[in-house]
Image (tube, rainbow, N blue to C red):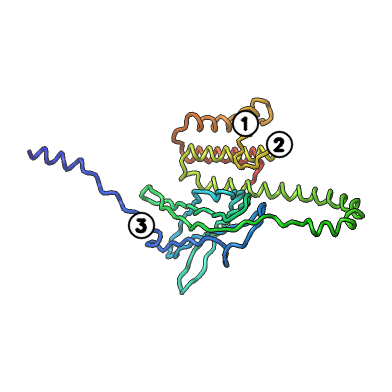
Amino acid sequence: MENDSLNTDTTETAPEIAMPTPEQLGISVISGPEGGMPALTVGDTFEFPVTVSWSVQGSALLVVPAGSANAKGLTQVGLSQESARSVKDGAEVASIKFTYKIVAQDTGNLNIPAMRFEIPTQVGRPLDLRSESVAVRVNEPFNPLPIAVGALVAVCVLVAGLWRIRRRAAAKEAALAKNEAQEELRAQMMVLKHRVNSADSREWLLELENVCKGYVARHFGMSSDDGTNGSVNLDAMVKGGRLEGWESLVEEFAHARYGGGKRDGFENRETWKAAMRLMGIEEEE
């Protein structure tokens, strides 16, 4: 009987460690611009800030975005972050400001979803943070018809000159759009870099594949307006000789889709570096 008692004791498991709440750790999440969201027009691209702050007290936190701002009528097209420190009520406060770039693609009363963030911990489970959902009003575009009728005669006189001006402006806009797209691509890749050790390997690789598809769609002038890049077939383009040097990277994406499996963070970092090189992106100093 004594042996049975001993055997029973050795099979007991330690109680699960209760995770503290963000409030208990003095972590706060503030979403939306000061003064509230302005009214928008369909097609507008706007910035939506989410700030995570905490009392420093000699500590540093890694805050990793774990979701997107995609919702009905809203599509996320970029993400950047900025760290800062300040003094409030005699205590030093650290903060990270995440700025989501969003396109309004539908009209009506829409909602920017609650953004989710993860803070890695020593117990193996991340601390989960969530911002509040924020309402936004998106209106129909302004109808310029009454003004256009009154200005029709003057416009006809100026057509030739405007055509030349528009050609120059279009060329300049195309160059700016290319630079902006490159910056957005760099921002997406930097988010993936920060998640290289904490994210699920298969999910991380599929997210990297989608970023690469977006780059290929823009590079070859393919349509990717729906945000899914579903029309881009990297396998077919590699076999057709249109993506020279992408063979190994595309094989890793295929393995993630059909095989999967746990990978070390080192392997993901090397994959990330290969993708940066193939897309011609230089990491900022």
Residue at 72% across / 57% down in the picture? 142
Q: Label 1 belongs to which residue?
A: 233
Question: Amino acid under label 1?
Answer: Asn
Residue at 81% across / 59% down in the picture? 147
Please identify the quarter of the rendering in which residue 34 is found. bottom right
Residue at 58% across / 54% down in the picture? 100
Identify which residue, 284 or 148, lies in the foreground.
148
Q: Earlier in the sequence, mark 1 or mark 2?
A: 2
Q: Give the side of residue 24 with respect to residue 78, left or right.
A: left
Q: Label 3 belongs to which residue?
A: 20
Residue at the limit of the structure toward the top, as seen here: 239
Using a 10 Å C-alpha cutoff, classify the residue at mark 1 as few (fewer than 14 neighbours), some (14 to 19) or many (20 or more): few
Question: Amino acid under label 2?
Answer: Phe
Residue at the limit of the structure toward the left, as seen here: 1
Secondary structure at badge 1 equals: loop
Q: Is residue 285 visible?
A: no
Residue 133 image position (x, y, % from top left): 50, 57
Which mark is in front, 1 or 3? 1
Residue at the limit of the structure toward the bottom, as seen here: 89
Q: Do callouts 3 and 2 mark residues in contact (Cβ within 8 Å)? A: no
Residue 220 image position (x, y, % from top left): 71, 36
